[in-house]
Amino acid sequence: MSPAERRAGTSLAAIFALRMLGLFLILPVFAVHAHGMPGGDNTALVGMAIGAYGLTQAFLQIPFGAASDRFGRKPVIVVGLLLFVAGSVVAALAQDVQTVVVGRVLQGAGAISAAVTALAADLTRDQHRTKVMAMIGSSIGLVFAVSMVAAPILYALIGMSGLFWLTAALAVAAIFTILFVVPAAPPVPRAVGRFSEVLADGQLMRLNFGVFALHLMQTAMWVLVPAGLVAAGLPIAEHWKVYLPAVLLSFVVMVPAIIVAEKRGKMKQVFNAAIGLLLLVQIGLYVEGGAGLWPLAVLLTLFFVAFNVLEATQPSWISKIAPAHAKGTALGIYNTLQSVGLFLGGALGGWLAQHVGPGAVSLLGCGLAVVWLILAAGMAPPPVHRVAPAA
């Protein structure tokens, strides 16, 4: 990659990371913290607070992507980040769970994922676009893992309000990054891909279902995981003792898996193996339940492995097979389904845990993983673009 492409990839991945870290930081701690707030005895409402940002993202992802086609990528990304700052401030000042929900809705209104990935496509050549998309996808998995480790420590130091103030500061840092670090964007082409063209593409829709299922499972799990660790005898301030080893081990496995997928053309095999691993995790969570700290720690490690591999490979796959004139549309739909999964994971996970029982959340994850594995098995491997050696 050229220096400009490397700068574009790292800076846009950093913007994604700063924003997603702000969204993920509350996952390991909010379900426990909410018990001390008015409304915190309603598990469904707590789940709504965890996943509410996905609801507004689901509605606004495509409009933000379309606006970036019309008004330019950077202005739209800045507006989205300002909305995220506003939501973080509302949540930081909240005195009850209902107000936290309002703040999370505002956070999600800054639906910039499609605009950021479209800007990445604008700033990179075809032969290097996969690498940049993988950098952005990996940043999501990385910050999710970091949030699992950092959140309990930060919560003990600055409290829940401090976490939301921190997310506001991270979003401000992202605004400075987009304005002063990301290279200038080229003129945006006016051609827009048709929704029907993307929706009729079976390969793209399988990937869209995959990102929906992955993020639904991820958010639904964290309605229960913090309380499960507490029930296993680990105070919330010490949850990092489980998350840190799990995260480190997962990256030891993830890096060679990504190398095999990209360098040796084994994307489909690695992809399907990660989905199968997700299924095993969901089965394990259902069977083990609250059996103890060690089983839960092992299952979390396996989950991080699968999640990080899939977060790195799915955007790469999308960038390889989406029609050139419809990449923005394809990315908008992809990110919309991701947001729907994030919202439903919190809302549906909380509702199932309260009205049916914790085991129902894991059974839902099992069902989604089975359907996803069946759909992925029928996919054609993505094309492998090789750059010819210099003469």
Image (cartoon, helix red, strand yellow):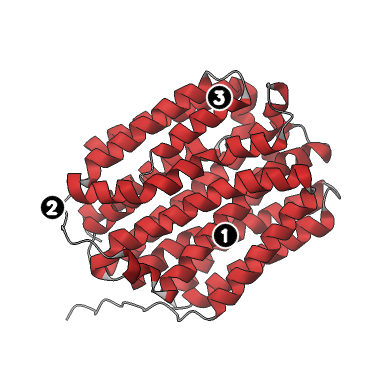
Residues under numbered marks 2 and 3 in contact, where contact means CB atoms less than 8 Å apart: no
- Depth order, front residue of 99/309: 99
Residue at image position (51%, 29%) is 102
Q: Position of residue 177 (x, y in %)?
A: 29, 37
Residues under numbered marks 1 and 3 in contact, where contact means CB atoms less than 8 Å apart: no
Structural crowding at the residue carrying mark 2, measured as other residues with C-alpha within 10 Å and reported as few (<14), some (14–19) or many (≥20): few
Amino acid at circle 1: Ala
- Label 1 or label 3, whichever comes before in sequence order: 3
Which residue bears the numbered disc 3?
99
Q: Which mark is residue 339?
A: none
Left/right placement of residue 210 relative to residue 220 reads left
> Which of pointers 1 and 2 indicates the residue nearer the eye?
1
Q: Secondary structure at mark 2?
A: loop
- Label 1 or label 2, whichever comes before in sequence order: 2
Image quarter in which the C terminus is found: bottom left
Q: Is residue 376 above or below residue 164?
A: below
> Which of pointers 1 and 3 indicates the residue nearer the eye?
3
Which residue bears the numbered disc 2?
187
- Label 2 or label 3, whichever comes before in sequence order: 3
Q: Position of residue 219 (x, y in %)?
A: 60, 47
The CA distance from mark 1 to mark 2 is 35 Å
Structural crowding at the residue carrying mark 1, measured as other residues with C-alpha within 10 Å and reported as few (<14), some (14–19) or many (≥20): many
Which residue bears the numbered disc 1?
213
Q: Secondary structure at mark 3?
A: helix
Residue at image position (51%, 26%) is 164
Residue at image position (40%, 77%) is 382
Amino acid at circle 3: Thr
Q: Position of residue 61 (x, y in %)?
A: 38, 48
Residue 245 can be seen, yes or no: no
The CA distance from mark 2 to mark 3 is 40 Å
